[in-house]
Amino acid sequence: MPVITHLAEHLAPLVGHEFVREDNGVFVVSPKDTHEVAAVIGFADHHGLKVRPTGGRTKLAWGAAAEPQIELSLQRLNQVVDHPWQDLTCTVQAGCTWETLQQTLARHGQFVALDPLWPATATVGGICATNDSGALRHRYGSLRDLVLGMTIVLADGTIARTGGRVVKNVAGYDLPKLMVGSRGTLAVITEVTFRLYALPRYAQSFTVTAEIARKLAALMQAIRDSHLATQALQLRGDASGFALDIQLNAHPEAKQEAMLAVLARQHGVTIHPSSPDVWRSREDLMNTPNAFLVKVTGKASELSSNAAEVVQLGGRCVAQAIGILYASFPNISQTYSALGSLYAHTDAGSMTVLSVPQNPQDDSMPPWGAKEPSPLTMLVKQQFDPNQTLNPLAIEPAPQPVR
C-alpha cells in the first residue's frame, strides 16, 4: 500500500482545507463539483491511492468496497441542476438525496418513476451505482430505462459526458447503462439526467392473501396480461403465508377496482384495500437486524416457487413481479445450507448476498466457494480502471448446493 506523508496537505488545495478530514486513517474529501472530483481522483490515480466514492452510505455493504486511503464524499454535490419540466427531463447532482429530488420535481406534478430504498438518505449517485429499484419497475421499467445521460469521472481524472438531456438521443455509446449497477468499479457518477413522468393522481392499493404462493402466481400473471392500469406489483412471503400487493392508477370512472375484483374471484381469492405502507415492505425487510440479506434474480415464472422456498427455509421475502426477489434469513446457524439450496435453483439467474451478520462463522456451516467475475467483466474493468484506483470487482460468494 503506497504511503504519502502529509496526505491532507496534498488534498487540501484541491477542495479546500475545511473539506478534508481524517477518519481512522482514511482521508474523507468533500469536493463541491465535478472538476474537484476529477482533481482528487486524478491525484489518487497518479500516486497509486485507493478511492472509495460515497453518498448517503446506505449501501456500502453491497459489493466489494475498496480499502481506501481516500473516501470521496459527494454530499456537497446536492443540487437539482436543471428541470425543463416541459421536456419531462431533469439533471441532478449525484449527492442529492432521492427525497429532495422528488420533492423538487413534485412542484410541477412530476417524478422520477423509481422507488429506491431509504429515499430520505440515499443519494442519486448511490442509487444509480447499485441499480436499486422497487415495485414501480413493473409499470415504468428499470433504472437503466429512466437514465438519459450522465457526467462521470474516469479513474484517471478524465471528465466524460454520456447520453444527453433529451428523451430521444441515439448518438454515441450508451455508457449510462454500463454505469448503472457498476458499484463504483468503473467511474464516479457526478450528474445524472432522468426522464420524468406525471405524478399518479388516482393510485389505489389492494392486497390478496393466500396460504401458498402458487395460488397467487396465476393471478399475478393474469394481472400482467390484462388491460388493468397496474402501476406496481409485489409478492410478500413469511411464515404466516403469502400476499400479493397491487397498485392501480386509473380514473374512478374506469372502474378498474371492479375489474380487478372479478379477476381475483376467477382465481379463487378476494381483494382487500391496503395501506400505501405495504410498499415499504422491502425497506422493512432490508432493515432486519443481524440477518443475511439476499437478492435473487430469475424468471418471473419462477418467482412464486422461489418465494415458497425462501419461506420453507426459514426466511421471509419481498419480490417484484418481474422476477427479482429480496430475502432475509435471521437464523445464522441455518443460513448457509438455506442459501445453498436456493442457489441451486438460480441457474438461469443470479444470487447476490447483500449483507452478512458480524461473526457468522460456525464449524457446522459448509464452506463457500467463490464465483470469479467473468472475463468480459474483468476486461471492461481493465479498460476503465487499469491502476485499480476505484472499488475492486466483487468476487461473489457461491454457497455449495445442498446434496
Image: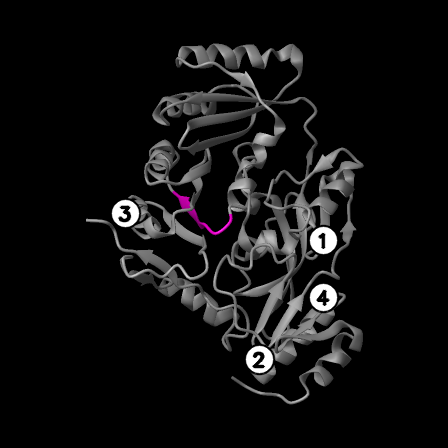
For the image, the number of numbered tags is 4
Decide which of tag 1 and tag 3 comes sooner along the chain: 1
Q: Which residue is mark 1?
A: 96
Residue 116, percent from left and from top: 59, 44
Q: Secondary structure at mark 2?
A: loop
- Residue holding disc 2: 49
Judge the density around disc 1: few (<14), some (14-19), many (≥20) Cα neighbours within 10 Å: many
Please tell me the numbered disc located at residue 344. Answer: 3
Would residue 15 appear left or right of 236 to someone viewing this image?
right
Mark 4, Cα crowd under 10 Å, few <14 / some 14-19 / many 20+, is: many
| Callout 3: SS | loop
Q: Are marks 2 and 4 in contact (CB under 8 Å)?
A: no
Distance (Cα) linking label 2 and label 3:
39 Å
Task: Tell me which secondary structure the magenta stretch mostly adopts.
Answer: strand
Residue 163 visible (yes or no): no
Q: Find out whether the residues at labels 3 and 4 contact each other: C-beta distance under 8 Å.
A: no
The amino acid pointed to by label 2 is: Leu
Residue on which disc 4 sits: 34
**Is there any visible trace of residue 155 in the rendered image?**
yes
Label 4 sits on what residue type?
Thr
Compute the Cα span from label 2 to label 1. 26 Å
69 or 364: nearer the eye?
364
Q: Is residue 335 above or below residue 60?
A: above
Span shown in magenta: 289-297
Which of these two is toward me, 104 or 342? 342
Image quadrant where residue 211 sits: top left
Frontmost of labels 1 and 3 is: 3
Whichever of callouts 2 and 3 sits on the residue coming sooner in the sequence is: 2
SS of the residue at dot 1? loop
